Amino acid sequence: MNTAWSIEFIRIFSLILSTLLLGAVSGYWLFSVVLHSGLYIGWNLYQLKTFERWIRKGAPKNSAPDTTGVWQLTVQHIYRSQKSNKDRKKQLTKVATHYHAIMSALPDATIILSKNREIEWSNKRAEKLLGIDSQKDIGQRFDNIIRDVELNKLFSSDEEESVLEMTSPIDSQTRLSVFRKHYGDDKTLLVVSDISQRLAVQKLRKAFIANASHELRTPLTVISGYLEILETEEELPPAIGKVIKSASQQALRMEQILNDLLVLSKLEESRYSVSSGEVINVAMLLNRLVADFKVTHNATGNDFELTVDSTLNLKVIERDFYSLCQNLLSNAIKYSKEKSTIKICWSLSDDGQACLAITDFGEGIAREHLSRLTERFYRVHIERSQKVVGTGLGLSIVKHILDNFGGYLDVQSEQGKGSTFTACFPRSRVLFSDASKKH
């Protein structure tokens, strides 16, 4: 760069020197200035014209202007920029090709829609699951190709992300899960998965649980009946009496497990819409539940501290909601210290969700176990499970109920200080008995 500017300065200095010499020799100073200025301007105009013609042709390397000084430097800068852009374009093309190869190889159908629901891109899997041709259907409206009422509701939803299940438009035996997400400048991403096999496995599992429960219930009832008869025998030795009592307790526990498995099976089949359910007075239900627990379940003498918003109601299936509260409260009693306080709070969260929080002051749960508490038959400690009688399915039932209602379960616990289980329900299910709170 220094050489180019040096040449340009030498050129200007030579021009000035020539101007002075001609003016001094001829005495025509104005003529000398005009002449040399015209030559310099004319030369630069010629270089500018050559440069413009080269740029207009796309700045090909083999026909670059043959010049010196600043003009040569400018040509070199453009050539370097051109080379850099070409390398960047190659890299971007490589990345785009790699990206499209990955998207095309995905096991799920992937579709990108414009603001007007026009198909901008789709992979090969979309043709197998939805019948969308990745070449012919580009630019077509998605809802003109696939007409489905539930799918239109999915598009009209204001939520950023939403999911629905539907039957494949090209195969009535195939069930699909459609995930929709808005992104970028009013773009929509659709990811469609084939869930037929998963549903078949679930159906098989439900059938097995139902059949196993039915087959086990009859012999279990017979065994329980004989054990009850033996328990009433007064002439049995004390050692035998203890064994029979223990066997009766295990038979009762097995019956509870069968009942809970059937409840779980039914919950997995349930698919509640936003409008499903009935409006229930949660405050009244919680007061009734606590009164029942004080009589039938509270052998450890715990106190119950209720903090309830009596105006906050919920639109749910009352049977399922009662089961949720019963399992959470029973769980809190089992793992609380004797004569400790159990706190029950029913309130509206900051983000408008209705939350039921039940706090116990028991031994608490280590952090590494929190994420697995809702798994079936999961036990934190073997020693702990031996002390506390239960089926190991209560929290799993709670989770499934919340999933069906669009809610979630949050667990906070600290060892030695107790735990708080919070069941939150979405705003769409929240209702108020006091009209002033609706706004």
Image: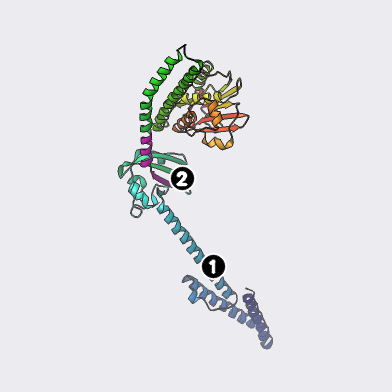
How busy is the neighbourhood of tag 1: few (under 14 within 10 Å), some, or many (20 plus)?
Answer: few
Magenta stretch?
Answer: 189-205
Q: Tag 1 or tag 2, which sits nearer the N-term?
A: 1
Counting from the top left corner in percent of width and height, residue 321 is at 46, 25
Tell me the kind of residue under disc 1.
Ser
Residue closest to the eye, 98 or 158: 98
Q: Which residue is mark 1?
A: 81
Quadrant where the N terminus lies?
bottom right
Counting from the top left corner in percent of width and height, residue 46 is at 53, 77
Counting from the top left corner in percent of width and height, residue 439 is at 52, 29
Query: Quick check: is 342 in the magenta stretch?
Result: no
Q: Is residue 361 left or right of residue 178?
A: right
User: In the rendered image of this protein, does residue 84 appear above or below residue 114?
Assistant: below
Tell me the kind of residue under disc 2.
His
Can residue 300 be seen at all in this image of the molecule? yes
Q: Which residue is mark 2?
A: 182
Query: Quick check: is 202 in the magenta stretch?
Result: yes
The structure's colour scheme is rainbow
Q: Residue at 47% across / 21% down in the picture?
A: 249
